[in-house]
Amino acid sequence: RSIEVEASKLTEIEEEYSRRFAAIADDLRALAAASRGTSIEPLAFRLLSSMEQGTPNLELLSDISSSVKSSQKLLEEFEKLERPEQLLEQMNRVKKELNSVTAEITKLREELKRLEELQRLRTQLSQQLIKAERELGEVKKEEARLKAEHHAVEEQLKEKRRELDEARKAQQEASQLSDFIRFLQYLRTNIFGKDGLLAKSYRASLKRGLERYASEYLQKLGMDYTIEFDEQLNLKIITSTGTASPEDLSAGEKVSLALALRLALAKSLSTGGGASDIIILDEPTVYLDEERRRELVRVLRDAADMVPQLIVVTHDREVIELSDMVYEVSKEDGVSRVQPLTP
């Protein structure tokens, strides 16, 4: 704004000097007209021409004055002129005005140079301001981009923290699960395993039951044998003459032993809370003599009270008469047929 004010002032000064130059030029034209036919006339026109070109030659005024004072002829010519004193006075006034105007012009030129420098600085500052505003815009864009990236990074950090918390929780749960698995493995090995506490206790209880009931059933079947089992439930038969293995028995004795063991197992499970729901016997009287067959019937009668369901596949009439329900299986035309019978 201050530069514009200075420029306006300089414009006004320049207009004032133009008016003053015009007045001086009018005086010079009057001087030239008044000194027509003398040596002053061309000097006046030359001075007027230099003023019109913007470079007034002040030495011409000195030449005019010297010519007037030193030349008698000029004095005589001046005497011919009307009002020569006024011309000299006018010349001196013109010289003074020209000196003043020249000084003002010099000052004006300096001011114009300063104004041009200020204008150049203003243009430079405007360009710098535009550049700074453009750079500021870029900085704001970069700031917005960085804020967006910062927000995205914060969201990623939140997600990673959440994943880390979940991973830690999962790790903790996995650790707890691993501890629980180790505990289960301990229970399976030391409690429920083959050599575990429960297994040993159960085997010991089962061993006692099998030995007792199998020996009792063998006695009922007419076999004076005692059954024993080792820790691994391997069978050992105690006879009056020593020990025997199942391979040492006759076919009938093997059947009796198998029945005694099966019934002993069912009774042991029943007394231990794990009763067997069903026992199936296929031709149990085969290879048995008449006495043992009668004993087997008595054993089956006792077993019927112990086992919920006892199924016997047999052709023996005594066993059939013992049954609560009888089904006959026959084959007709190549097709097996099952029908209930009254025992």
Image (cartoon, rainbow, N blue to C red):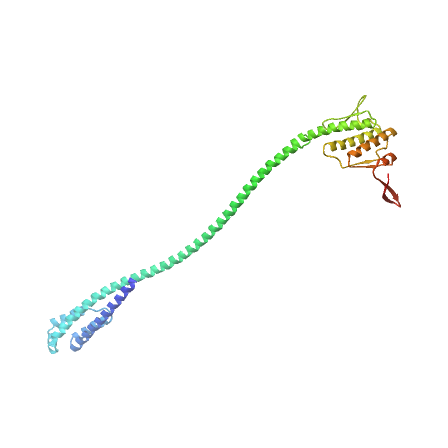
Q: Is 178 left, or right, of 55 in this rendering? A: right
Q: Which of 161 and 296 is in front in this view?
A: 296
Please give the name of the residue rendered at 43% of the width and 55% of the height, measured from the top-left corner: 141
Image height of 15 relative to 254, above or below = below
x, y percent for residue 288: 86, 30
Q: Nearer the viewer, residue 180 or 55?
A: 180
x, y percent for residue 88: 13, 73
Q: Is 333 left, or right, of 138 in this rendering? A: right
Residue that lies at the very extreme toward the top in this rendered image:
241
Residue that lies at the very extreme toward the right in this rendered image:
333
Q: In the rendered image, which quarter contains the N terminus?
A: bottom left
- Which image quadrant for residue 27? bottom left
x, y percent for residue 67: 14, 71
Q: Which of 90 and 336 is in front in this view?
A: 336
Query: Can residue 140 be seen by looking at this rendering?
Result: yes
Total marks placed: 0
Query: Can residue 42 be seen by looking at this rendering?
Result: no
Q: In the rendered image, which quarter contains the C terminus?
A: top right
Please give the name of the residue rendered at 18% of the width and 76% of the height, measured from the top-left corner: 30
Q: Which of 278 and 137 is in front in this view?
A: 278
- Which image quadrant for residue 60? bottom left
